[in-house]
Image (cartoon, rainbow, N blue to C red):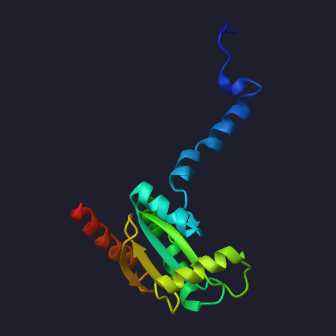
Amino acid sequence: MTNNKFIPLLKTKNSFYIITLFFYFLPLPFLLASENPKWLTNYAQALSEAKKENKMLLMNFTGSDWCPWCQKLDKEVFSTQEFKNYAQKNLVLLEVDFPQHKTQSAELKKQNEDLANQYNVDSFPTLILLSPSGEELSTFGYMPGGPEPFIDKIEKLRQKIISKN
C-alpha cells in the first residue's frame, strides 16, 4: 500500500458537489453573452438610452395580440437569434403596442397614441427607425424573408449615419 499525502479530488466526500457546481455554472458566461435585447415601452427612456449608447432606436408600432402581420413579424424576425444578436449590439428597441385584450396603464395608452399621431402611424405593423439623436431615418413595415432583409435595411441606414460622423 502506498502512502499518498494528497487525497485525489474524486475520492473526497464533497467532490460530487464540486463537480456538479462546476458544470452547472460552466454555461453561465455563454448564456449572459447571448442575453435577449429588452423591448422598452417608455419612449423617453428609450430615446435617452439610444443617445447614451449611440444606438439607433427601432420603434415597433404593433397590435401584439390581434394583428396577424405583427405576430408574423415577431415570429419571423424579432424572435430569431440572428435579430436578437444584431439588436443587442446595434439597437434600442421600443414597443408601441395597441392591444385589444391586454391591459395597459392610461399613461402608456396616451404615450402610444401620441407617438402614433406624431409619426403618422395608421397601420400595423409600422416600424420607425430613429438615429441616436432622435432624427427619423426610415419608416417601413413587414418584409418577407426572415431577419436577413430586415437587418440589411437597418444596417445600410446605420452605415450611412456612421459615414456622416
Tell me which residue sits at (40%, 69%) in the image.
Answer: 134
Q: Is residue 70 left or right of residue 102?
A: left
Tell me which residue sits at (42%, 64%) in the image.
Answer: 86
Vertical placement of 50 versus 77: above or below? above
Tell me which residue sits at (63%, 79%) in the image.
Answer: 110
Q: Is residue 37 visible?
A: no
Q: Quadrant of residue 140?
A: bottom left
Tell me which residue sits at (55%, 50%) in the image.
Answer: 32
Name the quadrant of the C terminus: bottom left
Q: Position of residue 66 (x, y in %)?
A: 65, 89
Given residues 86 and 135, the one toward you in this image is 135
Name the quadrant of the N terminus: top right
Q: Is residue 102 visible?
A: yes
Q: Position of residue 99 (x, y in %)?
A: 66, 84
Q: Position of residue 120 (x, y in %)?
A: 47, 88
Vertical placement of 5 versus 103: above or below? above
Q: Is residue 142 left or right of residue 26?
A: left
Q: Position of residue 161 (x, y in %)?
A: 28, 66
Vertical placement of 149 versus 123: above or below? above
